[in-house]
Image: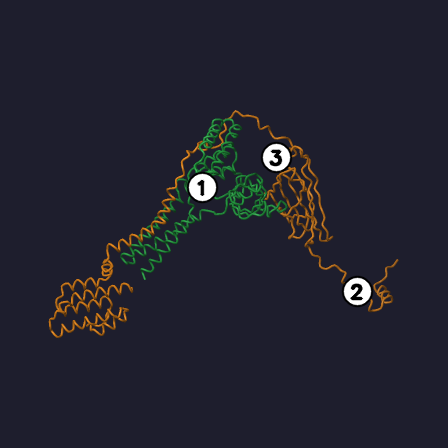
């Protein structure tokens, strides 16, 4: 009986590992960024920094740098490039693009300290109303604490320990290592599933303009949302559905409504398709 | 002139119509009377209907008469009147601005500034309007469309347009000799471009895939290196077996062997009898789920023990009794362990 149970646990663990591996955001191999483009972007950024006392001129330089970094991140996304893109966008007074860049970087490196700190700063610049509707909850974890990475390591360690104890069970045929193996398996499931609670799988949206009307239907004739009639630039939301040129979104505080597709930034397939069709 | 009395009118009617015609006239009059008046407006409604039922009038006032382009001016809208509570004025239902207002203004309702005084028949709403250009000369006139259930029709109420002077925004090219710091210094630093590190993903994959394979390989290697450790492992589980095996090493006589075996069976399997006889042990072991062959071997062994003990004859078989007992105990341990 003990042997059968331990073999069953072994297969369950193996299956769990396959599921965990499939669901983990494993970073795909990306092409190296074009060195000429990197040099041009860095040069534009440094020119902007050099002329930071002249706000208008600096803005133009930072905007140019942001455009170049955007091309780089599309070709070879990496956390460092997203930091540069976010910084250049923020300094060029493109707050929505900056927030969007930091968020995309955090999708690749969820525990990156610089990305988290700069995102916090950028969120402060968003003009939420006095009721703070639409404002995402604060990132409560200390910047030095890589929670998701620790959970990932914890899951791997629990998984390895559980398998080790299962083999000890087969060798000694004792109940004690099997009990410990079961405990480790439970720890593996907990560590593996906890990060899912931190992440919202729905595509991220960032409102691109000020005073975007949030409406109760997919058209301008519908009534505005009673609680949050207008969205401001930089507000974050999640894409729920789409119809025609309108998208149905949910704000960070739960308000649901429709906005035109060109009022928000996103990297979801729907937006990319829409851009393609609009180009054609 | 004296008005005719009711009796006179009735007598005139009786003279004019017969009884049957009078009954029909009464029925017609009863049917033609309006039913209990419903407060709900009809389904077909004007486009600018504000979902308001009753008798109301609208007034408006602005906090400024001069404003810069895209700067806010607050338009206070007061609605005065009475109506059923179900259709009292509500901000989200108001449709009071002309259709072309959005071409001239950005309009933002201010729910926080909405105030309602139903007991005084007054509601107050505030809108923040931002003129889009200097072409704007007036804050828009307002039109409040309501449904009057007494007259059973939709009626408008108007508020006049308010003159407004819109001046251009301040010239943004004015330079101030100030060092403007837009963000902390860390935002002005370029992060060194390092190739993305994928060792974490590689390690995760290695652990997730490699661990089961490694564990199976470890177990198979252990089995190959310790082919008889299975027995040792099984024997370790039974303190009774260990004790019995130890005593059998020192046992020379058949009665000692028989006693050790009986103690082992009692301690290990709770054999109830004091003396272990062959038929009892056979039946007992079969009940325990031991194989028939093993039970037979145990019965034969105990019969040999009894023969050696009671006949007093020392045969070559009696010398082999301790070794045979050790083999039988190991077999029994294997079977009971695997069945456990």
> Which chain has been coloured orange in this picture?
B
Q: Label 1, label 3: how many angstroms apart (C-alpha)?
A: 36 Å
The residue wearing badge 2 is B26
Is B257 left, or right, of A117 in this rendering?
left
The residue wearing badge 1 is A106
Q: Colour of chain A?
A: green
Image quadrant occupied by the C terminus of chain A:
top right
**Which mark's residue is nearer the viewer, 2 or 3?**
3
Callout 1–callout 2 Cβ contact below 8 Å:
no
Identify the element where label 1 is drawn. helix
Is B143 left, or right, of A217 in this rendering?
right
**Which mark's residue is nearer the viewer, 1 or 3?**
1
Q: Is residue A125 above or below residue B32?
A: above
Q: Nearer the viewer, residue B224 or B270?
A: B224
Q: Label 1, label 2: how many angstroms apart (C-alpha)?
A: 83 Å
The residue wearing badge 3 is B70
User: Residue A13 at x, y = what percent?
Assistant: 37, 54
- Locate residue B142: give its quadrant: top right
């Amino acid at each position: 009986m003990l042997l059968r149970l331990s073999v069953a646990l072994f297969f369950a663990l193996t299956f769990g590992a396959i599921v965990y591996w499939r669901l983990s955001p494993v970073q795909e191999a990306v092409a190296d960024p074009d060195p000429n483009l990197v040099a041009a972007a860095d040069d534009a950024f440094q020119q902007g920094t050099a002329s930071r006392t002249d706000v208008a001129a600096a803005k133009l330089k930072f905007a140019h740098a942001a455009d170049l970094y955007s091309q780089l991140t599309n070709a070879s996304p990496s956390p460092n490039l997203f930091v540069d893109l976010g910084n250049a966008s923020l300094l060029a007074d493109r707050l929505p693009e900056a927030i969007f860049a930091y968020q995309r970087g955090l999708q690749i490196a969820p525990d990156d300290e610089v990305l988290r700190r700069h995102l916090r700063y950028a969120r402060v610049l968003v003009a939420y109303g006095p009721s703070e509707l639409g404002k995402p909850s604060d990132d409560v974890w200390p910047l030095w604490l890589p929670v998701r990475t620790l959970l990932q390591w914890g899951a791997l360690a629990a998984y390895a320990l559980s398998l080790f104890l299962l083999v000890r069970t087969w060798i000694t045929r004792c109940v004690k290592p099997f009990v410990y193996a079961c405990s480790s398996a439970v720890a593996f499931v907990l560590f593996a599933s906890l990060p899912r609670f931190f992440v919202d799988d729905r595509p991220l949206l960032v409102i691109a303009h000020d005073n975007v009307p949030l409406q109760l239907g997919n058209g301008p004739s519908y009534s505005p949302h009673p609680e949050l009639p207008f969205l401001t630039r930089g507000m974050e939301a999640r894409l729920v559905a789409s119809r025609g040129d309108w998208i149905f979104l949910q704000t960070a505080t739960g308000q649901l409504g429709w906005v035109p597709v060109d009022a928000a930034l996103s990297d979801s397939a729907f937006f990319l398709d829409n851009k393609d069709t609009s180009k054609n | 002139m004296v008005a005719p009395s009711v009796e006179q009118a009735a007598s005139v009617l009786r003279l004019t119509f017969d009884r049957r015609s009078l009954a029909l006239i009464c029925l017609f009059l009863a049917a033609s009377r309006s039913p209990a008046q419903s407060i709900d407006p009809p389904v077909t409604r004007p486009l600018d209907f504000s979902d308001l039922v009753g008798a109301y009038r609208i007034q408006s006032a602005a906090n400024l008469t001069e404003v810069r382009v895209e700067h806010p001016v607050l338009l206070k809208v007061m609605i005065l009147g009475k109506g059923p509570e179900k259709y009292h004025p509500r901000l989200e239902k108001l449709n009071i601005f002309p259709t072309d207002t959005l071409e001239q203004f950005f309009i933002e309702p201010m729910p926080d500034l909405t105030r309602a005084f139903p007991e005084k028949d007054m509601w107050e709403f505030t809108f923040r309007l931002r003129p889009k250009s200097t072409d704007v000369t007036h804050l828009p006139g307002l039109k409040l469309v309501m449904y009057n259930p007494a007259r059973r029709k939709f009626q408008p109420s108007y508020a006049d347009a308010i003159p407004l002077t819109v001046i251009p925004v301040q010239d943004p090219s004015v330079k101030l000799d100030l060092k403007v710091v837009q963000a902390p210094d860390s935002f002005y630093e370029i992060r060194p471009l390092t190739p993305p590190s994928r060792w974490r993903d590689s390690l995760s994959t290695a652990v997730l895939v490699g661990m089961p394979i490694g564990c199976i390989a470890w177990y198979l290697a252990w089995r190959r290196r310790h082919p008889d450790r299975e027995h040792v492992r099984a024997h370790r589980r039974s303190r009774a077996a260990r004790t019995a095996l130890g005593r059998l090493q020192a046992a020379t006589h058949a009665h000692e062997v028989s006693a050790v075996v009986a103690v082992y069976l009692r301690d290990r399997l709770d054999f109830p009898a004091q003396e272990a006889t062959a038929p009892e042990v056979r039946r007992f072991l079969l009940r325990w789920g031991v194989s028939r062959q093993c039970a037979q071997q145990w019965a034969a062994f105990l019969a040999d023990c009894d023969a050696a003990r009671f006949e007093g004859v020392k045969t070559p078989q009696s010398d082999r009794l301790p070794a045979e007992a050790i083999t039988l105990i190991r077999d029994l341990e294997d079977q009971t362990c695997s069945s456990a």
